Image (cartoon, rainbow, N blue to C red):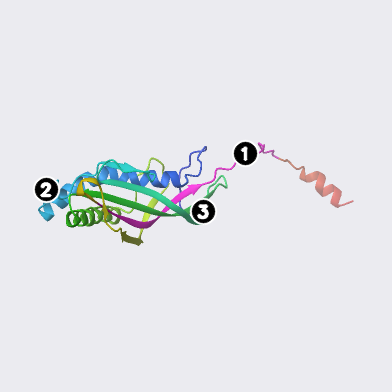
Amino acid sequence: MPTVNVDPDELMYGPQFAKEYVTTFLQNDIPTRINRYRNGWSLDDISLPATATYVIFEPLALDSWPTIITVAISAKSFSRFYHEKTSDPVYNVTYAMRTYIWVRADGSEQATIMRDRLTTVVRSALLDRPCFARSSIRDARVEESTLSEEYSDLTLLKGDRVMAGSYIGYDVVMEEVITRETIAEFEDYELVVNRSIIGASLNV
C-alpha cells in the first residue's frame, strides 16, 4: 500500500483544479519550449509567436493572439484505490480535458502553419512531462495514450486576417481524497480482569 501524507482538512479538487494544473504547467513550460523549437526549426518570433494569453474558460471573444484555453469536458471515472489510516477514501478521478490553440495571421497559409506549429509545441509539452508539479502531495498526470488532435476550419476576420484553431484532447488522472467528518470522539479504556475470581467461579 502507498504511504501518503494528508492534510486533515483536505477536500476533493474537482475540475477547476485540473484546469489550473494544466494551465500553470503550460505557462511555465511553453516560453522556453517555443525558443527551443524556433532554434530547431530556424524560425523567428513572427513565424512562431509566444503565447499571449492562457485561460481556463471559453471566452465569448478572443482579443489576444495566440491564446491557449484549457477546459474540462467531463469527469469520466472515479476509482477508489486506497484508504488512509483515518479511513478517508482516496480516488483516481479521470477528467477528459481539452487544450485549445487559437492563432491569427495575415493569410490562410500563414495561419494554418502557425496553428500547426504551436499545436505541436503544446503537444510536446504534454507528452514530455506527463506529471504536473502540484503544491499538494497528490499525484496529477496526463494519460499520454489518450491524446488526440482536431483542427478547425479557417475563419476570415476583419482586415483580411485569418483565424485558425485546434484542440488537443487528453485525460488527466488526479488523486483526490474525501476527508470524512469526525462524528464523535472515542476513548480507550483498559479492562483489568481478576483471574482468581474467574477461576473460583468456574469451580463452583
Instruction: Give percent across and percent down for residue 113.
Output: 19, 57
Type of the residue with mark 1: Thr
Residue 2's place in the image compared with 31, above or below, is: below
Q: Is residue 142 left or right of residue 50?
A: right
Q: Residue furthest right?
A: 204
Residue 171's place in the image compared with 32, above or below, is: below
Q: Which disc is residue 44 wearing? A: 2
Badge 1 vs badge 2, beta-carbon distance below 8 Å: no
Badge 3 vs badge 1, beta-carbon distance below 8 Å: no
Separation of residues labelled 2 and 3 (CA atoms): 50 Å
Between discs 1 and 2, the one toward the N terminus = 2
Q: Is residue 184 left or right of residue 80?
A: right
Quadrant of the rendered image containing residue 172: bottom left
Towards the viewer: 192 or 101: 101
Separation of residues labelled 1 and 2 (CA atoms): 59 Å
Q: Residue furthest front?
A: 159
What residue is pinned by disc 1? 182
Towards the viewer: 125 or 54: 54
Q: Element under label 2?
A: loop
Quadrant of the rendered image containing residue 23: top left
Between discs 2 and 3, the one toward the N terminus = 2
Instruction: Give percent across and percent down for residue 141.
Output: 37, 53
Towards the viewer: 89 or 14: 14
Magenta run includes residue 127: no
Type of the residue with mark 3: Tyr
What residue is pinned by disc 3? 82
Badge 2 vs badge 3, beta-carbon distance below 8 Å: no
Residue 151's place in the image compared with 196, above or below, is: below
Crowding at dot 1, Cα within 10 Å, few <14 / some 14-19 / many 20+, comes out as few
Between discs 3 and 1, the one toward the N terminus = 3
Q: Which disc is residue 202 wearing? A: none
Which residues make up the magenta segment?
163-190
